[in-house]
Image (cartoon, grey):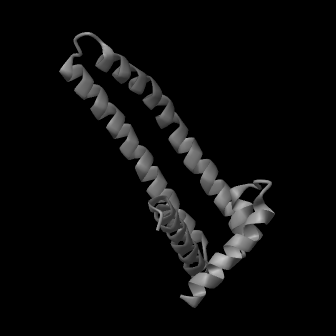
Amino acid sequence: MKRFAVILIGFVVALPAFAQSPPPELVLQQLLGLESSQVAAIQNLNAQRRAAIEPLVAQMRPLEQELAAAIESASPDASGVGALVLSIRALQRQIMQHDQNARAAFADILTPAQRAQLEAIRGVEAAIHAIEALRLLGL
């Protein structure tokens, strides 16, 4: 619990330093103590991920528009709508796979200590969501 509080405080203290919205890899460099070679590897990984996902998103947009139009038509063709849904879902699965691969590759870039720190940061993120839920409930 003490470690969680220390990380939360560090995160909150570091937050104003990032108010100018620097590149995310530089934020990670500060928070995780990344070496310049790790930052370069993360930038490369992000570029590869984007290059793989952008064409899939570009393929999905017209299908989504076509699906919306098909659903809104006076007499939607169920088989056509179903085919569009399946095509969109297939592209979404490919995107999800690229995301999972990128997360795994990102973890491989980090040292064990950095991975532990990242998990602690993710725990803080979950706590922030829980705090917001409590606030919304008035608790």
- Residue nearest the observer in this picture, 107 or 16: 16
- Residue nearest the observer in this picture, 134 or 86: 134
- Where residue 126 appears, as percent x and y from the top left, is 49, 68
Q: Is residue 66 left or right of residue 80?
A: right
Find the residue positioned furthest to the top. Answer: 74
Residue drawn 70% across and 60% down? 25
- Where residue 82 appears, as percent x and y from the top left, is 23, 28
Residue drawn 47% across and 67% down? 130
Residue drawn 52% across and 43% down? 52
Find the residue positioned furthest to the front. Answer: 138
Residue 32 in view in this figure: no
Q: Is residue 110 left or right of residue 28?
A: left
Residue 10 in view in this figure: yes
Find the residue positioned furthest to the bottom. Answer: 2
Q: Quadrant of residue 137?
A: bottom left
- Residue nearest the observer in this picture, 8 or 27: 8
Q: Quadrant of residue 113?
A: bottom right
Q: Is residue 13 above or below residue 21?
A: below
